[in-house]
Amino acid sequence: MADPDSDIARQARRWAVALGAGPLPPREQKRFEQWLAADPAHAAAFADSRAVFEDLGRLQNLRAYARLPARPLSPVARLQLWWEGAHAAPKFALAAASLALAVAITWPFISIRTDSYQTSVGQTRQVALADGSQVDLGPASSLRVRLSHGRRDAFLDSGEAFFTVAKQHDRPFYVDAGEAQVRVVGTQFNVRRDAKLVRVAVQEGVVQVGAKYGGQALTLRRGQDATAKDGALSEGSIDAAEAGAWRGGRVYYAGARLSEVVADARRYTSRPITFASPEIAELEVTASFRTEGFEAFITGLPAVLPVAVAAQPDGSLLIRTAKAS
């Protein structure tokens, strides 16, 4: 067995816990497979960790759990705490103690429920969660939701979602959208994620938004939004009705980068849209139109911006500077 304090052992425990909570999303599954194949020691450490995870009857020490704080720990922290205690434990213990510890550790895992939801281009979906919350999932979006006894977690891997969160003051609701981390108790807000930025807009209630890197955080209320990009947060204001307006078939942009509009267009139309240069993607756009009008808006850009839009032989649309037309 690998040194339980080594980086390899810690990584193996994280993977064991993640896989124990349900299937990994494709990107994470690929990362896991690459990590596993990188070194025979990784596979051995993972086998050890998975064996512990699956055979909780071997747990023999309650001393570590005497140090548990009143606030529930995450599954990763519980497994880590047990491992550190068991590593120094004596080789004997009562069967009753083993059983009690098995129940104490398995309960958080048993109470976890993870569900995955996806939509295709142009498709929307309404999801009712087991805690009473509701999610409206936008086109070409991917969402995972994990509900446990102590907290609620949603992972927006791509696309857009509008959350109507049921109030549970002792059980916060978190949304991980990559660049931005969101925490609420009960509220209504929209989260939009593309390859370059994340935007959070609040329709009702209070939302705490933190940047993934750097520790910056904002508290947003009705009619406020925040954009997370390159590890930084910026705050703005909106008409509260515009948060999640896409659910009613309309989108609004106020000084948005053209790249953001095109990222949305790619979720509503299967026709590929590309930029001839990065500079064009940074042009600002202010507009409002029906969601079924994305392609018409893109082809009509020359009327409002110094660009030309040309159909390519493969059927895609290329946006380039007007003087290059």
Image (tube, rainbow, N blue to C red):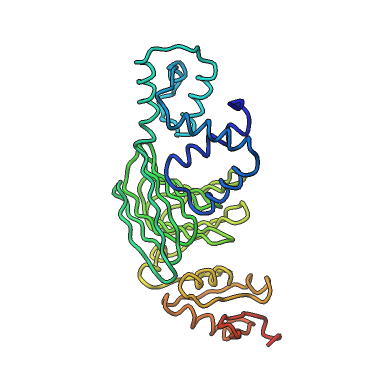
Q: Residue at x 47, y 42 (%)?
A: 19
Q: Residue at x 53, y 74 (%)?
A: 286
Position of the C terminus, as image quadrant, is bottom right
Q: Residue furthest bottom?
A: 325
Q: Is residue 285 above or below residue 216?
A: below
Which of 34/200 is in front? 34
| Relative side of 227 to 170, left or right | right
Q: Position of residue 52 (x, y in %)?
A: 47, 29
Quadrant assignment, res 62 = top left
Which of 220/294 is in front? 294
Q: Position of residue 53 (x, y in %)?
A: 45, 32
Q: Position of residue 157 (x, y in %)?
A: 49, 55
Q: Is residue 251 above or below residue 34?
A: below
Q: Residue at x 54, y 84 (%)?
A: 299
Which of 182/42 is in front? 42
Q: Is residue 148 above or below residue 298?
A: above
Q: Position of residue 25 (x, y in %)?
A: 48, 52
Q: Residue at x 67, y 81 (%)?
A: 321
Which of 280/76 is in front? 76
Quadrant assignment, res 190 = bottom left
